[in-house]
Amino acid sequence: MFHTPFFSALRPRLAPMGSRTARAVKTVRSFTLCQLEKCLGPWVPTELFPKASEKANSRDHHYTRWRTFWCMLWQSLNPNASGREVVRQLQALFKLEDGAELSEEDGAYCRARARLPLAEFPKVLAATATNADKLAPALRLLQGRPIKGADGSSVTLPDWPKNRAAYPPVQCPKGPSFPMMRIVVLWSLVSGVICALAQGSLQVSELSLLTLLTSQLAKGDILLGDRGFGNYALIALLQHTLGVDFVGRPKRQIDGRHRLKRLGRNDWLIEWKKGAKASPWLSLAQWAGLPQTLTLRAVKGSLYQKGYRVRQVTVVTTLLDPQLYPAQEILEAYLRRWRLEMCLDDIKTTLQMEMLRCHSPKMCQQEVFTRLIAHNLIRCTMAQAALAHDVPLDGISFKGSLDAVRQFSQAAAQARSKHKRQELWAELLKVLASDLLPDRPGRREPRAVKRKKNKYPRLNAPRHKFRDHLKRHARRKISRLRKLALR
């Protein structure tokens, strides 16, 4: 009726939902079966991963850039899912919407993943971090200035020639060695999200990787770092070149007897002198531009909490004013850094990023970025729940939030109206806010496993060369047959 040439003036009244229905069906067909786009899409800019103007991804195929990205994100939220499972979901969606038939193989999906531009993933990561910081409750530590933390880790890559060439493994005499990727991340103290990522091989130091992330720091930021970052070159580079303050444990031994000025109990001003040897991770021009001396503040205090290993720490900082930045707030900020170091553990354990699965360096980098983006989107959900129900963000479980998002997204995909989806999302936030982590003071548990992972030995040769030895009775049988000239 909508396309009839008669009654053109009455066409909107005769078929008021005609054009909108067609648009709605077209929109649904561009989604995935789980429809994570409707749940988590508001925190991802829609202008990212656009259709290419020419060559690859310039036509509307089944595996568009946007759909491929959300399929990868679904895989990150379900780490045990294979590419074949993604294809089966799309097959079910196309059958549901009377669309075209897809190939049963996952090769097209893998090629679509490889065609995604790697440069878009850092933009998505930064956008999700910005949205999470807007949702999270504000911090009043250190005059409310933006506080970011730096931390490093490593992940294991599959043993493929391209991965070994890009990320040489550490030789292990007791077993096989795998390619290793070193990563350094910047995370926000407000929401616990990952803001930026730098990666390299184990031959590249964490300090060198951190210098690649200095463009993500703005003037007035405060950087928290552990003992690996508490050296003269980095502190001087941050303060005099970027205008960024530093709080962290030092590599040097701090002696209160050689202080410049006493600011309070266990609170002093000290002077660090520039070393004679240039830093290996800075250029000669950068090293020459650093000042000869630095005036720093050393704060020593107790951070005793039941279950924590370190009870007393000494931190150095470029925040010299004891009135604006009390010593207790500096120690409290450093204590929160310890708690947020668990964000990397959430990613490596809960999202299973400790061992990657891709066979090329580019795809491995893409896989790491996708896991970090998935982590940020879950943290966005946690921040929204904390803000809506006035509960502490640290009390919401990441694993519980991940499980809830998985199940509620499936229910939202079956909802027939926008109002019902909004009700489901409100119920999700209510569930997250009511299921807080229990308070377990004094919990001390060793890092040990009760059950052995498996009973089989390590594979110390390539799979195509590794062959199992025959049993003794089988060898004897073959020997008898050979003596009888029957084999």
Image (tube, rainbow, N blue to C red):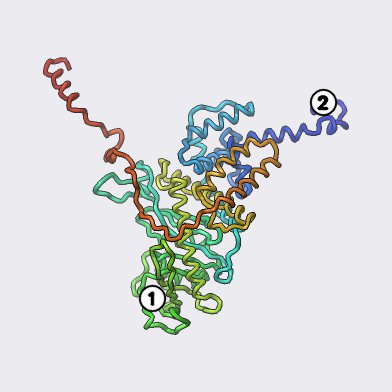
Element marked by disc 2: loop
Residue 170, horizontal then vertical, whole percent? 30, 51
Q: Is residue 383 left or right of residue 358?
A: right
| Amino acid residing under circle 1 | Lys
* Discs 1, 2 touching: Cβ within 8 Å: no
Along the polypeptide, which appears first: circle 1 or circle 2? Answer: 2
Residue 244, horizontal then vertical, whole percent? 51, 69
| Amino acid residing under circle 2 | Thr
Q: Is residue 20 above or below residue 426?
A: above
Q: Is residue 479 above or below residue 329?
A: above
Residue at 55% from the left image edge and 79% from the top image edge: 323
Residue 159, horizontal then vertical, whole percent? 35, 42
Element marked by disc 1: loop
Q: Quadrant of the rendered structure where residue 7 is?
A: top right
Residue at 53% from the left image edge and 49% from the top image edge: 373
Residue 381, horizontal then vertical, whole percent? 59, 50
Quarter of the N terminus within the rendering:
top right
Please give the label number shown on residue 381.
Answer: none
Rate crowding at label 1 as few (under 14), some (14 to 19) or many (20 or more) other CA atoms within 10 Å.
some
Closer-to-camera residue (117/7): 7
Count of marks placed on residues: 2
Q: Is residue 32 left or right of residue 356?
A: right
Please give the label number shown on residue 4.
Answer: 2
The answer to whether residue 152 shows anywhere in this view is: yes
Rate crowding at label 2 as few (under 14), some (14 to 19) or many (20 or more) other CA atoms within 10 Å.
few
Closer-to-camera residue (47/303): 303
Q: Quadrant of the rendered structure where residue 408 is?
A: top right
Q: Which residue is under mark 1?
A: 274
The answer to whether residue 122 shows anywhere in this view is: no
Q: Is residue 210 above or below residue 89?
A: below
Q: Is residue 451 above or below residue 271?
A: above
